Image (spheres, rainbow, N blue to C red):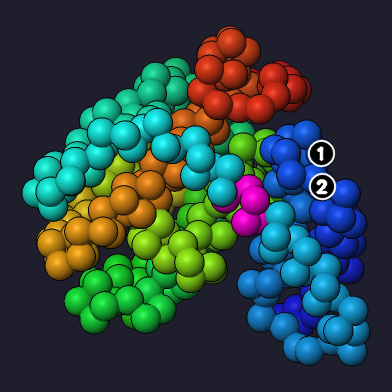
Amino acid sequence: MLQLSIDPEIRSKVRALAERAARIGDGPLANYLSPEELQIGLNAFNRARLQASLPSKDWTTELPFMRAVELVEARFIEEERARTRPQLRTLPQTPAEFVEWFVALKENGPGQYDSFFDHLAEQASYAELQYFIKQEYNGEIGFDDLIALTQVRLPQRAKIELARNFWDEQGQGYADDVHGPLYEAMAAELGVTDTPDHEFLWETLAVANLLTGLAVNRRYAWHSLGALSVIELTSPTRASRVAQGLARVGVSDQGCRYFRLHTVIDVEHWDAWLAEVIVPLVSATPELAMPLAEGALLRLNAGARLIARYRAELGLGSAEELMRDGAALPPRRVERIG
């Protein structure tokens, strides 16, 4: 049955962050909120504003709380943007050089070819892979929805390519091939169900909150396009390693299908995005190189921070490595996995 109203618990979390927002000064958010408080609150905010629902009788009461959290979201995104500035000092100025720089992110971008994915492929236990999927599955808005939100009023050529990608996400009209249910079937086989907020790593929620904030707010539309583009660029290598690990611990062929599919289809998607989106945009409007690059780095930096936390949680890296990769707090150990 469809849920047509916002869950009271979600409303409560949004209100809690809004009330804290009234006491936030001009300094960094970390001076006023823990990363967990911030990301759990933003996660609730995104669930509230994206859920298809009916008007509530008290919408006029709730709206000021939503607006207050929207300002907190903006502060979060702007702080993330500030972290990319040193990485963008040598961004190439010509369209051709920019495209070369962007493509090279697959090899030298933050978090690329991290040993964590070798561990998933070759050594991780069933429980460790289950833990990874639990975080990934429940922590992020669907890629299809991000595409739909981002494509609003983009130039026609880019819009058409994003529409093709969206149609692929929908299985090109075949219910058995829709990507979302494929992921859900894999998660179900692993015994992964809904995850309470307190069991999420804040870094997991930060990735989802960042991508949602970029896609929903039109002032970040080009940043969102850069973030989605780099996902398509970097996904195949990681997907192949995850698929290898899942098969190794006995997950069925159907359960591995989602990741195996993305080792192939995302290569095709990236080639098309490069030819139909990135190159035409920066060739016609070179000023777009900066937000596209910044959006890509926003996603890669958030992903690298999450990977470092995964390594720490699974005993694969030190707290010092985690802090070096940009986390705000030392890791809190979860119960031993495996």
Q: Position of residue 182 (x, y in %)?
A: 45, 59
Q: Residue at 56%, 60% (x, y): give it.
A: 213
Q: Quadrant of residue 141?
A: bottom right
Say which of 23 and 114 sits in front.
23
For image coordinates 20% across by 76% down, the residue present is 157
Amino acid type, callout 1: Tyr
Q: Which mark is residue 24?
A: 2
> Looking at the picture, which amino acid does disc 2 mark?
Ile
Q: Is residue 116 magenta?
A: no
Q: Main secondary structure of the magenta part?
A: helix
- The residue furthest left is 96
Where 97 falls versus 16 (above or below)?
above
Foreground: 260 or 88?
88
Q: Position of residue 132 (x, y in %)?
A: 56, 35
113 displayed left or right of 188: left
Query: Which secondary structure lies at badge 2?
Result: loop
Rendered location of residue 292, percent (x, y): 32, 54
Q: As drawn, is 256 to the left or to the right of 261?
A: right
Taking the spot 27% from the left edge, 47% from the top edge, the residue there is 233
Q: Mark 1 — residue?
A: 32
Asked which secondary structure carries label 1, the reply is: loop
Where's the N terminus, which quadrant? bottom right
User: Which mark is first along the chain, 1 or 2?
Assistant: 2
- Spatial separation of the CA atoms under disc 2 and disc 1: 6 Å
User: Which region shows up in magenta?
Assistant: 73-77
Q: Pick out the residue farthest to the front.
A: 26
Q: Residues within 10 Å of mark 1 (few under 14, many from 20)?
A: some
Tell me whether circle 2 and circle 1 mark residues in contact (CB < 8 Å).
yes
